Amino acid sequence: MTNLTELSYEAADQVEELASGLHKRVQEQIEEFLASQLKKLGVSDKRGFKRVLYPDDPKTLAVYQYDGKDILAVRIGPNDMSIVFDVPEIETQKEVRDCD
């Protein structure tokens, strides 16, 4: 018979592996959305945006802004069981400009 301590370590390892994989996928999705939003703005460089954290709002993980306007929000979804990406509609700019 397997002892409970061994099962606990195995379960903890599985949870850590799942959490790590989820974090990686969320980061990849954030990067894709940011690249798309910045391209629509005509910006070729991410230096002009900032990430805003709201510690008093447990459902909002982060809001990304460019020039003071929200371009992406990442929140915990309904019933705390999902991650929601709020991607506002941005009017596409005609030319790409550098953020210096």
Image: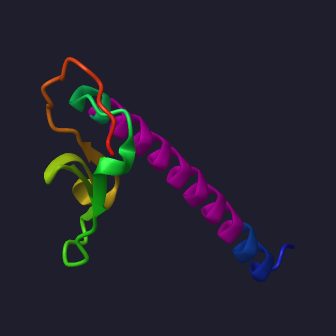
Image quadrant where residue 42 sits: top left
Residue extending farthest right? 1
65 left or right, relative to 16? left
Between residue 50 and residue 28, name the one nearer to us: 50
**Quarter residue 44 falls in:** top left
Residue occupying image coordinates x 76% and y 82%: 5
Residue 28: in magenta span: yes
27 sits to left or right of 93: right
78 horizontally vs 30: left or right? left
Q: Position of residue 68 (x, y in %)?
A: 14, 54
Q: Is 59 placed above or below 70 here?
A: below
Q: Give the residues in magenta.
A: 11-37
Seen from the viewer's position, the closer of residues 37 and 56 is: 37
- Report the residue at 28% width, 44% height from top: 85
Observer-nearest residue: 47 or 29? 47
**Is residue 26 found left or right of 98 in the rendered image?**
right
